[in-house]
Amino acid sequence: MAIGIFGGTFNPPHLGHLRLCEAFARQLRLDRVLVIPTFVPPHKTAPDLASCEDRLAMCRRMFSADSRFCVSDMEIRRGGKSFTVQTLEALQAQYPGERFYLLVGSDMLQSFDTWYRSEDIEKLCTLCAAPRESGGFAQRDGAVSLESFEPVEISSTQIREKVRLGEDVRTWVGADVADYIRQKELYADPWTAYRRLLRKKLGDYRLRHSFCVADSARKLAEKYGFDPDRAYTAGLLHDVMKDTDKKQTLVFMGKAGVSLTKAELHNPKLWHAMAGEAFLRTELRITDEDILRAVRYHTTGRGGMTLLEKIIYIADYISADREYDGVEKMRNLAEKSLESAMMFGLTFTISELCDKEQVVHPDSVDCYNELCILKDRRGGSL
């Protein structure tokens, strides 16, 4: 019997692994392929490594359709670092007289001689190499190359990042594994659920902007001594209602008990901030008043702004996606003083509104006047 061995971290397994396993079995006419998740990868650290149980469960979902494929927990049961030669010796004892074929990435051939007991490995099996990506292929005497195989150019690292960012990864891992990842909340961070929500509520442009504002808010918080995680949350959610239809926004605010002043009724561009605060309060059950106020006043500013409110107001102006005239000056000012950046931003906004003969919200006027008074008290500098 010809037995293939396909080991790896499988963190998570993806369709590229499945396609490779299928090509492996087909080209070498294998009777069985043992898919063996490692306990601890010997050649790399894995800070976001899913548990052994979860990786086994995902592999069983991924490889279940083909009767030739068998997911083995032998390295996990052994514990400790997983050295290939130990696995091969155990398999030789379990399947005496059978032929073994070990599948590795072609890039690993270049460092194969550094593997633990590499000479013994070559005595115990036939090495088989598959390309990691399209193009170039490393060779080694005695190794079989799957040269006709066209790899799926996605990595487990990329998939973990997609999950963290709230993306749908079914295209890469299939529905069964994607459902498992979501049910178990694998590879998620505290904001993954919010990112998934934003993907449903916002278009691509606004989604990217929200991510960029969150990143800017975190950096500003670290610089000026505020909790970076709370700043990131406020930045991420500040535009949660931005792409909602105006009529739906009004209906939502009415149900949430938000009343609008005459100035606010005449400036629909402000509604998303008030609706955003209400959404965080009523739908997401966020009770952190600092975060709620930061979302509420990120467009207008106000008198007596808190540190987080200033951070979100400025992060909205200087996020990496912004390209307006003056953005570099705003970014430079933000590195020196939040108040200086606030003054620049308010002056820009109020002047633009006045030029267009549009309503200026009283909160913006209060904020501007407060900064003018502060500047005067400080002898002309913010």
Image (cartoon, rainbow, N blue to C red):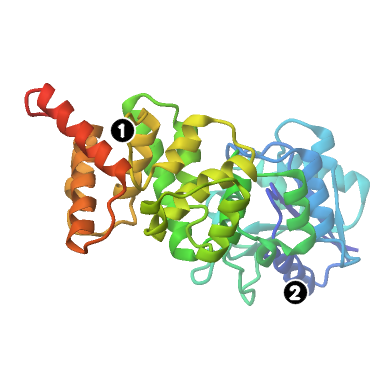
Name the quarter where the C terminus is drawn.
Answer: top left
Q: In the image, is residue 277 above or below residue 81?
A: below
Q: Depth-wise, is mark 1 or mark 2 nearer the camera?
A: 1
- The 10 Å Cα crowd at callout 2, few under 14, some 14 to 19, many 20 or more, is few
Residue type, label 1: Gly
Query: Mark 2 falls on what kind of element?
Result: helix
Q: Which residue is mark 1?
A: 303
The dot on residue 114 is none
Q: Residue 362 vs residue 352: left or right?
A: right
State the image coordinates of residue 322 (x, y, percent, origin top left).
30, 56
Q: Kindly identify the residue that appears in the image at 20 percent across and 40 percent down.
A: 343
Question: Is residue 266 something one can see in this rendering?
Answer: yes
Question: Is residue 35 something one can see in this rendering?
Answer: no
The furthest residue to the front:
262
Nearest the camera: 375 or 107? 375
Q: Kindly identify the residue that appears in the image at 78 percent across and 74 percent down.
A: 26
Q: Which residue is mark 2?
A: 27
- The 10 Å Cα crowd at callout 1, few under 14, some 14 to 19, many 20 or more, is some
Gap between marks 1 and 2, in whole Å?
72 Å
Q: In the image, is residue 282 above or below residue 287?
A: below
Q: In the image, is residue 217 above or below residue 95?
A: above
Query: Mark 1 falls on what kind of element?
Result: loop
